[in-house]
Amino acid sequence: MFGLVDCNNFYASCERVFRPELEGRPVVVLSNNDGCVVARSQEAKVLGLKMGVPYFQVKAEFEQRGGVACSSNYELYGDMSRRVMWYLQQRAPAVEIYSVDEAFLDLHGMQRHFDLAEWAGDVRGAVRQRTGIPVCVGIAPTKTLAKVANRLAKKDAIAGAGSGVLVLDDEAQRREALARVAVEDVWGVGHRNAAKLYAVGVRTAAQLAGVGDAWARKHLGGVVGARLLHELRGFSCSGVVVEDEVRKSVCKSRSFGQVLSELEQVAGAVATHAARAGEILRHDGLAARLLTVTVETSRFANLPPPYSHSAQLTLPVATDDTLTLTKWAQRGLERIWRPGLRYVKAGVVLDGLERAGTNQQASLFGDLGASPARAKLMGALDALNGRYGAGAVKVAAAVPAPGTREPWAMRRDAKSPAFTTKWAELWRVRC
DNA sequence: TCTGGGGTCCTAGGACCC
DNA sequence: TCTGGGGTCCTAGGACCC
């Protein structure tokens, strides 16, 4: 059996742990630039706020009704997530940390020794007590069904009908559960495939489980669709993946705080991303062989039509050197740059990762940044930025014109303190 | 005026190689 | 007259996840 533990309204719950005055009030957490609503407390959901809605569209009414908006504070959420995951690892034989607020548990064989519902209820209570974060637990014979069980456990708990735990361990329960879930809410069915399914009359997870394999292969993404159907029928196609430290790519991208049209300004953002991505490579002991630069104009403007392009470059030698990465990133940017457009976002993706220092052939084309001196320079760069704060030392391309603020910097007007990770921002308790 | 960010996996055509 | 097949790499993009 597989368990899925999912934190309720995770970001909003994290804010509440350290700001108890938010208890009982509608709370939302906003994406970068205070753009969209990305998390909602139950009270905010009741008010009708939708996930992903641009905040400016709902701000006035929400605040008038007593709502509180928080800018996202990923440092806090990351630390709270580690606490929850650490505890789960103490309780289950194997844990796959699937996302910041979700984990799959490998529970194979445990039903011989425990009543799984009782065990899960105990874990749920302990997570709440130790971290302040409420969770729900779904348990079933496949990961996809565990997601279904979790969704229903949450739904029932909100309706005041369940314990926040649901175990699906026989055929009748499986059928009943699938009939209660809309097809677009199944893990692996996005809005594209949901539309296709509705067009042929498939509206529930139960109906989806009955679709023919050939049809699924043809219309639901080949093997991906076939696996999805198997899992819904109770045949597991994927296990719990514990060691997931081999990352396959690094992606750094951000919307700008304002529209940018000058090449040097966008180049500054790209250089910043390349540098940050390089830091992550060095931290993980990796080097990248492929570098992709992306730029976008607004998807929401009709005229001119949205422009979104990427350029992928194959580097002559895998590298983790910020100066080299920055140089190639600028080259990529020049390839996709169209003058006169209003850009809102840029990013850098590094792929083709390998362990740094392995397989690094000498190049015929001179300096490629792989010298010991450069490695030492990068070490000094990381040490300075670690000690004096991110961005204390930068490549020149990432430095804005004298006397100006970074034109690409984002807005974050309502961020809570880093309660658990910065001495200066610790929670204060008055005695 | 103001619409997120970081990932994974898969597909498919063309170039190129033997 | 008859003109292959298998493989990798590159590039771009689609779909999905939280």
Image: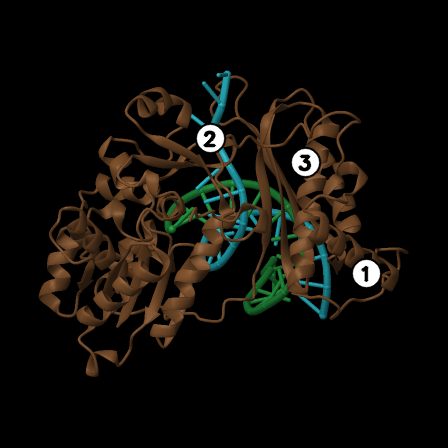
Chain colours: A brown, B cyan, C green
- Distance CA(mark 1)–CA(mark 3): 24 Å
Q: Amino acid at mark 2?
A: Gly
Give the class, few, some or many, for how many residues have Cα within 10 Å of label 3's Cα (few <14, many ≥20).
many
Q: Position of residue A123 (x, y in %)?
A: 28, 67
* A30 to the left or right of A374: left
* A187 to the left or right of A349: left
Residue at left offset 18%, top offset 62% = A166
Q: Amino acid at mark 1?
A: Ala
Residue A316 location, quadrant: bottom right
Which of the pair B16/A160 is nearer the observer?
A160
Which of the pair A158/A426 is nearer the observer?
A426
Question: Can residue A194 be seen from the camera position used here?
Answer: yes
Residue at left offset 33%, top offset 52% = A188
Which of the pair A390/A101 is nearer the observer?
A390
- Distance CA(mark 2)–CA(mark 1): 38 Å
- Distance CA(mark 3)–CA(mark 2): 19 Å
Residue ID for mark 2: A35
Q: Amino acid at mark 3?
A: Ala
Residue reaching furthest to the right: A366
Q: Indicate which disc, 3 or 2, sits on the residue closer to the N terminus.
A: 2
Element carrying mark 2: loop
| Disc number placed over residue A375 in the picture, else none | 1
Q: In the rendered structure, the residue with mark 1 lies on which chain?
A: A
Element carrying mark 1: helix
Q: Position of residue A72 (x, y in %)?
A: 47, 40
Element carrying mark 3: helix
Give the class, few, some or many, for how many residues have Cα within 10 Å of label 2's Cα (few <14, many ≥20).
some
Residue at left offset 67%, top offset 48% = A276
Residue ID for mark 3: A269
Query: From the viewer's perspective, is residue A427 above or below residue A241?
Result: above
Q: Indicate which disc, 1 or 3, sits on the residue closer to the N terminus.
A: 3
